Amino acid sequence: MRHLIAFATTLLLANPAVAEDSSVRGKADAAVKAAFATAPPEWKSRLEQDETMAVCSANENAPPQALYEAIQKREAATVLYPSDGEFIGDWKKGEALAQSGYGLRFTDYPARRENGGNCYACHQLTRAEVSYGTLGPSLLGYGKARGNGPDEVKAVYAKIYNSNATAPCSLMPRFGHNKVLTPDQIKHLVALLMDPASPVNKAE
């Protein structure tokens, strides 16, 4: 028993949670800032956590219910809906955006062309594209399964604009909130997911 206690004590002393938080996290933050030392000042704000990110990090993406609800309420208030009330754009443009990983390069600032959504990095969307990530769920048949009524379409727009508005501490980027994609671009991605003519919904 003494040996087990000594071993456990050694592990705790060698790697206490508090020391890990202050030392490892501090080193990681310093390394990130050093890597972007030449980034323009307005770009560097992306290296700082906002309130939601800080809460999610502190709670390992599983905040207690009260914080979960506070995040959802705060982030939902940031969603900027289209002024024309239209939520569906051109699915062909949405497919091009889903394929494109261009953007957010501090060496190309301001960007020479529009950012992409890089959706295939995390999701399967069509049968034709065989190279896709699996960090997120497959979206094959997304609109076909859920229907494309006004409420469903609006919910998809909000999810893409700010994922934390619907799923606090989601790993999905907050594309609109962080100005990665414009409202019009988000409309095109909504079309890709919801338009019956989209290859996403033609999948068998």
Image: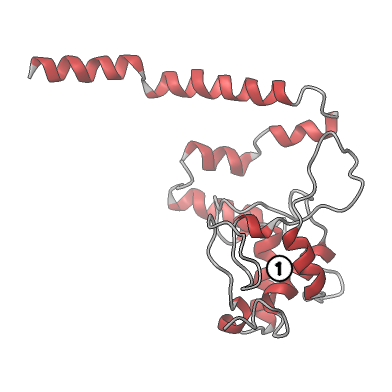
Mark 1 element type: helix
In percent of width and height, residue 131 lies at: 62, 60
Determine which quarter of the picture holds residue 163: bottom right
Protein image colouring: secondary structure
Mark 1 Cα-neighbour bin, 10 Å: few <14, some 14–19, many ≥20: many
Residue at 72% across / 73% down in the picture?
192
Residue at 17% across / 14% down in the picture?
6
The residue that disc 1 covers is: 157
Viewer-proximal residue among 78 and 95: 95
In the shown orientation, is residue 155 left or right of residue 57? right
In percent of width and height, residue 81 lies at: 78, 66
In percent of width and height, residue 119 lies at: 67, 59
Using the rendered image of the protein, determine whether residue 48 is visible from the camera's viewpoint: yes
Determine which quarter of the picture holds residue 52: top right
Does residue 56 lie above or below 149 as drawn? Answer: above
Viewer-proximal residue among 182 and 167: 182
Using the rendered image of the protein, determine whether residue 81 is visible from the camera's viewpoint: no
If the image is split into quadrants, where does the N terminus sit?
top left
In percent of width and height, residue 110 lies at: 91, 41
Counting every numbered tag in the picture gives: 1
Q: Amino acid at mark 1?
A: Tyr
If the image is split into quadrants, where does the C terminus sit?
bottom right
Determine which quarter of the picture holds residue 195: bottom right
Does residue 111 lie above or below 75 as drawn? Answer: above
Q: Residue furthest left?
A: 1
Viewer-proximal residue among 172 and 102: 102
In the shown orientation, is residue 86 left or right of residue 49? right
In the shown orientation, is residue 87 left or right of residue 53? right
Does residue 4 lie above or below 70 as drawn? Answer: above
